[in-house]
Image (cartoon, grey):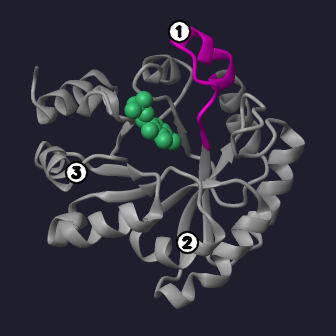
Amino acid sequence: MPEIGERFTEIRESLPDDVQLVAATKSRSVDEIKEIIEAGAKYIGENYTHPEATEKFEKLGELRKEVHWELIGHLQKNDINKALPIFDRIQTVESVSKAKHIDKRVEKAGKSIVPVLIEVNSGREENKYGIEPTESALEETIRGVGQLEHLRLQGLMTLGPYRGDPEDARPYFRVTRELFEAGKAYVEEDDGMEVLSMGMSNSYRVAVEEGANMVRVGTGIFGPR
Ligand SMILES: *Cc1c(COP(=O)(O)O)cnc(C)c1O
């Protein structure tokens, strides 16, 4: 079995330069995270703010500054205060109401701006978070987030239904890409719609074909959870 760092490098090198690789590190140890940082990882994605991400953030010490911290799991309202000092971007904003709750707490956390992505429930799944995959839902959310002083919208994120065959994910990635393009009409800043985060270990190649410029890979780097 190749080492974690080698697998990270292999995947990194297989991706076009303009596609960012987020290492999905839920359930991985601090030592495993150190290995990928040493291999050159720039982005790590955690799912659970507390206690998992808070403990890892603490334990990594100075090394934590080598990477961008991405929140890729659902953010509970009562974890917002803990999440804000850790995460450089929140990829899972699923409503204007959640965005407002975050916005209210940014200054107290010692920050002035928090970059965010809107999560799209591209498969309209009941057990997943995210806005409905329609242009009207997207427009409403973009306009709502746009009014908040401390959030900076940067793009969209989706999970999509998980099935064995990555081809089955393609239509959901495509729908999200179409919304991403449509959303450009509603953002005020030039950089308001430039990150499209989609695709996991089994599906990131398909996601890149469909326009993802950020993929989130866990098992492909670290092995089975
Ligand atoms: C776990 C996770 C991933 C990575 O999944 P793998 O199948 O391990 O690559 C990507 N995105 C999110 C939101 C996740 O929770």
Q: In the picture, residue 58 is in which quadrant?
A: bottom left
Q: Which residue is mark 1?
A: 165
Amino acid type of the residue tagged 3 in the rendering: Ser
Left or right: 96 as drawn, with respect to 58: right
Report the side of 110 relative to 224 (left or right).
Answer: right
For the point 30% across and 28% down, the residue is: 224
Residue identifier under label 3: 29
Residue that appears at 60% across and 18% down: 169
- Give, as a single range, the part of the protein colored magenta: 157-173
**Circle 1 crowding by C-alpha within 10 Å: few under 14, some 14–19, many from 20:** few
Determine the CA span between mark 2 and mark 3: 21 Å
Secondary structure of the residue carrying tag 1 is loop
The residue drawn where x is 55% and y is 26% is 211
The reply to whether the magenta stretch includes residue 158 is: yes
User: From where the camera sits, is residue 214 visible?
Assistant: no
Asked if residue 67 lies left or right of residue 108, the reply is: left
Whether residue 194 appears in magenta in the rendering, the answer is no
Cα–Cα gap, marks 1 and 2: 34 Å
For ligand 1, which image quadrant applies? top left
Q: Where in the figure is residue 220, as x and y percent of width and height?
A: 30, 26
Q: Which mark is residue 53?
A: none
Disc tally is 3
* Residue 71 image point, x, y percent: 48, 56
Q: Which residue is disc 2 drawn over?
A: 79
**In the displayed structure, would residue 205 be above or below residue 80?**
above
Relative to 60, say whether 141 is above or below.
Answer: above
Whole-percent x, y for residue 188 in the image: 72, 60
Ligand 1 closer than 8 Å to the CB at disc 1? Answer: no
Residue 143 in the image: state x and y as whole percent: 81, 61
Q: Is residue 162 above or below residue 183?
A: above
Toward the viewer: 76 or 190? 76
